[in-house]
Image (tube, helix red, strand yellow):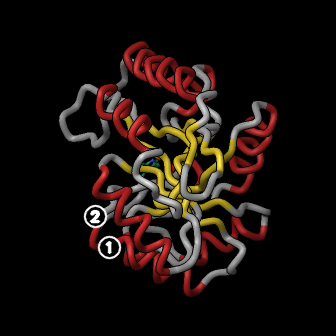
Amino acid sequence: MTINEEKYAAIKRELENNKVTLIAVSKTKPVEDIQILYKLGQRDFGENYVQELVDKEARLPKDIRWHFIGHLQSNKVKYIAPFVHLIHGVDSFKLLNEINKQALKNQRVIDVLLQVHIAQEETKFGMNEEELNLAITEFENLKMANVRIVGLMGMASFSDDMDKVRGEFHYLKTIFDRYAKLPIANTSTNAQCQLPILSMGMSSDYKIAIEEGSNMVRIGSLLFGERNYQ
Ligand SMILES: *Cc1c(COP(=O)(O)O)cnc(C)c1O
């Protein structure tokens, strides 16, 4: 058992003081570890792999809010659509469309974050500023009554250069501020979609992310210990 309960309590306090939501990233970790944090009151958990998430959801309490934080393939949306609370990494119309379709089948509305590419590495997914602007301005014409865009998500470079990381978060916050207060009329539901959530920051950089304006952090290894992928 590698759960660091004291660390959890300390991080929880720190985040509450800053009004930041904690997503406990439990990918690759057993359900027993999740149950420990659940008993301590944690309800928001993040997973990266569809099959793993589906298995865990079936075995754990139904009041857990499951966040899908990995790269989601369109053909797998159907497996998580019945229960997922928030999908963090949406970076294409194709995916948005599929989420809407599967949400409709399940007679629910699924909340999503648009992922913005902020890191210098090629491997990180996400939209550039232009694509993001198109997604947001076109959204109301698409009549997707079963999907709501509720914020932005970004991942900084894996780097020891904390100035660089800070700069990337700062850049995302600037973009976020531009859209945060912009109401997007969802013509089909007549509901107002807004972007209150800014999901940025992980174990290594969450403090910087909060200083730069994050209000949702995704923390794995600090809580659950290092991951073993073997
Ligand atoms: C794995 C992962 C995290 C958590 O990473 P840690 O460094 O263990 O905190 C956060 N966000 C995303 C998108 C991830 O894939």
What amino acid type should be assigned to the residue bearing mark 2? Gln
CA gap between label 1 and label 2 equals 6 Å
Vertical side of 62 occupied by 20: above or below: above
Q: Which residue is disc 1 drawn over?
A: 76
> For the residue labelled by badge 1, is the local secondary structure a helix, a strand or a loop?
helix
Q: Which quadrant is home to the N terminus?
A: bottom right
Q: Please give left or right for residue 70 compared with residue 32 in the image.
A: left
Going 47% across and 45% down the picture, which residue do you hit?
140
Going 42% across and 13% down the picture, which residue do you hit?
163
> Where is residue 67 drawn, in percent x and y?
54, 60
Going 27% across and 40% down the picture, which residue do you hit?
124
> Where is residue 48 drawn, in percent x and y?
40, 61
For disc 2, the neighbor class at 10 Å (few under 14, some 14 to 19, many from 20) is few
What amino acid type should be assigned to the residue bearing mark 1? Lys
Mark 2 sits near ligand 1, with its Cβ under 8 Å away: no
> Where is residue 135 drawn, in percent x and y?
37, 40
Can see residue 46? no
Vertical side of 92 occupied by 83: above or below: below
> For the residue labelled by badge 2, is the local secondary structure a helix, a strand or a loop?
loop
Residue in the foreground of this view, choosing between 53 and 224? 53
Contact between marks 1 and 2 (CB within 8 A): the answer is: yes
Which residue ends up furthest to the left in the rendered image?
122
Q: Quadrant of residue 115?
A: top left
Q: Which quadrant is home to the C terminus?
A: bottom left
Mark 1 sits near ligand 1, with its Cβ under 8 Å away: no
Q: Which residue is disc 2 drawn over?
A: 73
Q: Quadrant of residue 171?
A: top left
Vertical side of 76 occupied by 179: above or below: above
Which residue ends up furthest to the bottom in the rendered image?
59
